[in-house]
Image: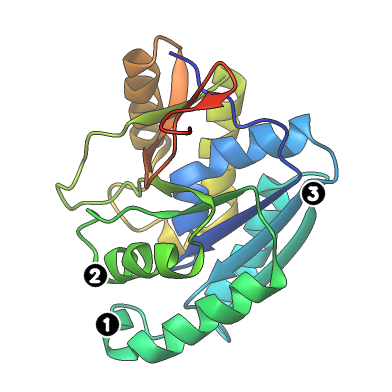
Amino acid sequence: MSLCAGRVREIAVVGAHCDDIAIGMGATLLTLCTAEPGLRVRALVLSGAGSERETEETDALRAFCPGADLEVQIGAIPDGRAPAHWDQIKSSLRAFRDRCDPSIVFGPHRDDAHQDHRLLAELLPTEFRDHLLLGYEILKWETDAHAPNVFFPVTTETALEKARLLHKCYPSQAMHDWFDEEAFLGLARLRGVQCRHRHAEAFVLEKAALTVGGVSCGCS
């Protein structure tokens, strides 16, 4: 069953680490930015500022958002220590929320095994209370594969381009045994099977109100 979010002119994408956004929704970004030239993409990444990863992330998001009106902010929260910086992260999200007006907010999902991802997923709905919030999945070695409930079909060419760009833009991650095209394309193929397309990316829907035939259920 298809659901339509309508025309999207601005999105917010949030990640705990450099490469989270590209791994979780790189093909979605490529598709949206190609379909909507000038799409406003506002990105917040909590960690990596002042390191080689900041340069990687900035270049990567430019590549994954062709033709977009892109703004990227990268913070300096220590990798793996997000829970100890709860107040700083909360304040960063509040300031980020005040600077953007997205139709859709993308971030990690609540059941992610990594504590940094999970904390961010828990805080996002406290700032983006009236937004369509979709949690992407981050391929990694933990066995935290979940059951997504929203799928975004992408073309085979786009899935291949995502895998290519990940390797090109994040050379610092090449040493990981899971960071390869076979893994990224395998997950995209699995999610495609689950929504009857060749390839797809998958998300967890935080919360939504149902409208059927132009009428919101429960309205008098």
Q: Quadrant of residue 101?
A: bottom right
Describe residue 135's horizontal placement relative to residue 158 as left or right.
left
Identity of the residue drawn at 30% across and 70% down: 119
Q: Which residue is mark 3?
A: 68
Q: Which residue is mark 1?
A: 83
The amino acid type found where label 3 is placed reads Ala
Task: Inspect this view and state whether residue 75 appears.
Answer: no
Q: Farthest front residue?
A: 220
Identity of the residue drawn at 52% across and 58% down: 170
Residue 115: give its label: 2
Q: CA distance from mark 2 to mark 1?
A: 7 Å
Identity of the residue drawn at 44% across and 57% down: 20
Q: Residue 196: x percent and y percent?
A: 40, 9
Q: Residue 217: x percent and y percent?
A: 43, 28
Q: Which element type, helix, strand or loop, lies under badge 2?
A: helix
Residue 36: give its label: none
Judge whether 219 appears above or below 199 on screen.
below
Instruction: First in sequence, mark 2 or 1: give its number.
Output: 1
Q: Quadrant of residue 108?
A: bottom left
Q: Closest to the observer: 75 or 87?
A: 87
- Callout 2–callout 1 Cβ contact below 8 Å: yes
Q: Quadrant of residue 207?
A: top left
Instruction: First in sequence, mark 1 or 3: give its number.
Output: 3
Crowd rating for badge 1 (residues with CA inside 10 Å; few <14, some 14–19, many 20+): some
Q: CA distance from mark 1 to mark 3?
A: 32 Å
Q: CA distance from mark 2 to mark 3?
A: 31 Å
Instruction: First in sequence, mark 2 or 3: give its number.
Output: 3
The amino acid type found where label 1 is placed reads Pro
The amino acid type found where label 2 is placed reads Gln
Q: Residue 58: x percent and y percent?
A: 66, 65
Judge whether 47 appears above or below 56 on screen.
below
Describe residue 111's horizontal placement relative to residue 201 as left or right.
left
